[in-house]
Every structure is written in C-alpha cells, then in structure tokens.
C-alpha cells in the first residue's frame, strides 16, 4: 500500500494517534480507596469507596459469604453514578450479627443524554463485619488525633493493636485540604488498607480540616448523620457524643478572609447538645464518652496566645456546663500536641480527659486504647511505639 496523497497519509496518522491515545486512556478501573465501614450501628452501616474512573456502584451482602442481597444508593429517582465517592447504606441489619459483603463498581466510559457506554466491572474482596447490640459486654476501640498528613501512623498503630472493634479519628488527621484526592490518600485509603474494610471508623473534625479550598468537600467522604460533623452514636451500652469545635481563632481573623462562621456554629451545637443530654438514650447509657478535637474543661483556657484561645473559650462557653454536669465519663481529644491525662478535680473537670500527643515523628506522639468490659472502661494512653504511658479505669 502506497500513500501518494500526503493528506490521506496525514489523516490516517491522525486517526492512528487518536486510537492510541484512546487506548491509553482506557486504563484499568482501580480502587483509589477500598471500602471503609462508617457509622456502624445495630441495624445500619455506611460503606464508602473511591474508584479511578467514573462508575455506578452497589454492595452485595448477606449473612454468609454467598451474599445474596444488594444495597444500591439512589437519590431523587436516579441511582448514584458519576460521583466522586461510591456509597451504599445497608439497612435493616440484625443486631449482634456477622455480615459479609463486597463492593461492585461498573465503569461508565461514556455518559450522554441518550447514550451510556459501560466498561469494566471492579469487585472488592469479600469482607465481613459484626453489628453491635445493646447488651454487648465487651468491646475495644482506638483513638488517634493530630496525625497531620502522616497516614503511615494509622498502619503502624492498627497493625500493633490488632484486637479492637473500631477507630475514632479525633481531628487534624490532615493539615489542610487543597485537593479531594488528599482526603482519599490521608483518610479513606489508609483506613481501608489497615482496618476499615471490617472495623468501622468514626470521624471527628479538627480545626485544620476546616482549612483549604476543598475543606467543604470533606463531608462528601465522611459519613455523618444528617450530614453534620456533630452527632451521637451508641455502641453496645455506651453512648458517644461527637462535637465539632471548629476553627481556633476568632471568625474575624485575617487568615479566614471573611469565610468563617464558627461562633454561630458552636452556639447551634450547644442547643443540639442540650437535646441530646435530655434524651432517654443518653440517660439510659452505661457510660458516656465525648469525642472532640480539643479539650473542654471547667477551668479558664490559658493555653496559647489570646488569638488561639478564642475557639476554646467559645466552645467552653457553649459546651462545658452541659458536659461536666450531666454525667459524661470520658473525654477523648487532642489539638495541643502535648499528651496529658486530666482527672476529675473541683473547678477543673468533672470528666476524665485524655489529650492525645503530637503527630508521628514527634517524641510525644500517642494513641489511646479504650476497653469496655461490661462494668468499666479501661483507658490506656500509649506512645506510638506501643509503650504504655498511663492507664486508668472508670467504673
Ligand atoms: Fe488542632
């Protein structure tokens, strides 16, 4: 075959190049984050994962590895598709029961008004998890704080402490949020890699996660009841309150450029907190644990300079009396990068408080392990290397 017409040769070369580019573009469909279990309750669990391509997805699940049921999210009459995060909610689960599941994502190669072309299908492995139940007489969890973009911490600790039921992340897991992919690489992907395919995570926002152009996207990746970073949940007979302390400096601070509204936000949470504390579920619980980014105490906030005290003082104004006078047993937090155990003391605190230390690489980096055994909470503050710093028991 000869090409006497240079224009024909040029156009064929162009077609060939175009085909090559398309072939290269059809890279395999992969997980950017495997599944994470979030907000597990006795009857419900949210499962999130992230894929490399546009997809439509669902979860297959059941009480045996044969699965058999399907959970697929739809909103406003449309099944989820073309979204940054794949999600499914399993509902009507039985308390105290083991479930098996796998995620399924089907690539959408082309999506036009009257034409959709599907591509590869990506299955996860089959994983399992157990729902808690009200009369649970033992469980354990780990608490992390202030990892600041060092996700290797999550692997280091969870591989050492294998025997736990869930993880709470107490904020400042990220330094700030420039890109949505950073949420995946710092939170979801390491959580999935090390524990969250079978043990749920609960997220508590820190002041640093309110920073950066994509901070408003965090809630798309983190499951939180009613889309709020403040919420409550129950695990067995223990009740958990999650508060979002927000930014630390005054809303008018120059570095917020007029985009912060945290005083009003904390005031709203104070109203919500009062309702929670008056609820039957809160009052019937065997223990009550507060998960919060920075400590809320009764004593005056004197740490840091005047600008950095604002958020802590404002949180104290709206939360302290409610928390310290209504039977909260334990407060887990961080923010200061200095580990500390504060025991109940008149005028200081009515609550046992564990403030976690700094991030990986700092000598005071820590994590906390809590073991509930029916009638007591054993709280262990440990260095990241696993060495025990201090342990105490709440009965
Ligand atoms: Fe912080």
Image (tube, grey):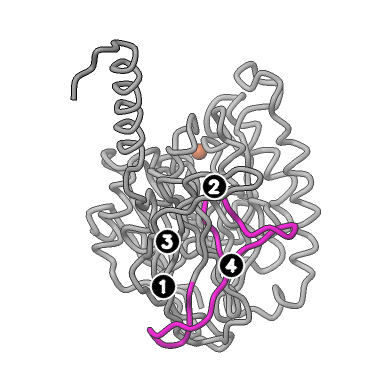
| Residue mark closest to the camera, 1 vs 2 | 1
First in sequence: mark 2 vs mark 3: 3
Q: CA distance from mark 3 to mark 4?
A: 14 Å
Q: Is mark 2 within 8 Å of ligand 1?
A: yes
Horizontal side of 184 relative to 220 (left or right) equals left
Magenta region, residue range: 60-88
Q: CA distance from mark 3 to mark 1?
A: 16 Å
Q: Which residue is under mark 4?
A: 72
Q: CA distance from mark 2 to mark 3?
A: 25 Å
Give the secondary structure at mark 4.
loop
Give the secondary structure at mark 2.
loop
Q: CA distance from mark 4 to mark 2?
A: 33 Å
Q: CA distance from mark 1 to mark 2?
A: 21 Å
Q: Which residue is under mark 1?
A: 165
Q: CA distance from mark 1 to mark 4?
A: 26 Å
| Residue mark closest to the camera, 2 vs 3 | 3
Q: What mark, if any, has residue 35 been given in the picture?
A: 3
Give the secondary structure at mark 1.
loop
How many numbered dots are placed on residues in this image? 4
């Amino acid at each position: 075959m000869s090409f006497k017409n240079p224009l024909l040769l040029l156009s064929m070369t162009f077609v060939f190049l175009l085909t090559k580019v398309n072939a290269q573009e059809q890279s395999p469909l992969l997980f950017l984050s495997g599944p994470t279990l979030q907000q597990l309750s006795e009857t419900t669990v949210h499962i999130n994962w992230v894929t490399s391509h546009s997809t439509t997805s669902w979860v297959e699940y059941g009480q045996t590895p044969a699965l058999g049921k399907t959970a697929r999210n739809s909103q406003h009459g449309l099944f989820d598709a073309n979204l940054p995060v794949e999600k499914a909610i399993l509902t009507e689960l039985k308390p105290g029961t083991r479930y098996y599941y796998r995620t399924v994502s089907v690539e959408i190669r082309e999506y036009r008004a009257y034409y959709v072309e599907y591509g590869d299908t990506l299955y996860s492995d089959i994983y399992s998890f157990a729902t808690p139940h009200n009369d649970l007489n033992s469980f354990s969890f780990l608490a992390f704080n202030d990892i600041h973009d060092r996700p290797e911490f999550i692997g280091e600790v969870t591989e050492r402490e294998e025997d736990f039921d869930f993880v709470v992340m107490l904020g400042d897991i990220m330094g700030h949020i420039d890109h949505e992919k950073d949420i995946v690489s710092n939170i979801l992907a390491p959580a999935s890699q090390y524990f969250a395919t079978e043990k749920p995570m609960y997220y508590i926002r820190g002041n640093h996660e309110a920073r950066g152009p994509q901070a408003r996207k965090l809630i798309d990746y983190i499951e939180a009841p009613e889309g709020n970073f403040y919420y409550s949940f129950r695990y067995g007979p223990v009740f958990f309150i999650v508060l979002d302390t927000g930014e630390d400096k005054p809303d008018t601070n120059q570095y917020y450029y007029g985009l912060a509204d945290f005083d009003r936000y904390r005031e709203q949470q104070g109203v919500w907190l009062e309702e929670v504390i008056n609820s039957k579920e809160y009052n019937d619980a065997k223990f009550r644990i507060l998960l919060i980014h920075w400590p809320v105490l009764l004593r005056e906030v004197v740490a840091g300079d005047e600008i950095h005290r604002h958020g802590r003082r404002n949180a104290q104004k709206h939360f302290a009396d409610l928390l310290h006078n209504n039977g909260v047993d334990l407060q887990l937090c961080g923010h200061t990068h200095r580990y500390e155990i504060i025991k109940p003391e008149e005028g200081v605190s009515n609550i046992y408080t564990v403030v976690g230390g700094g991030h990986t690489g700092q000598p005071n980096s820590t994590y906390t392990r809590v073991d509930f055994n029916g009638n007591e909470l054993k709280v262990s503050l440990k260095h990241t290397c696993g060495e025990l710093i201090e342990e105490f028991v709440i009965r």
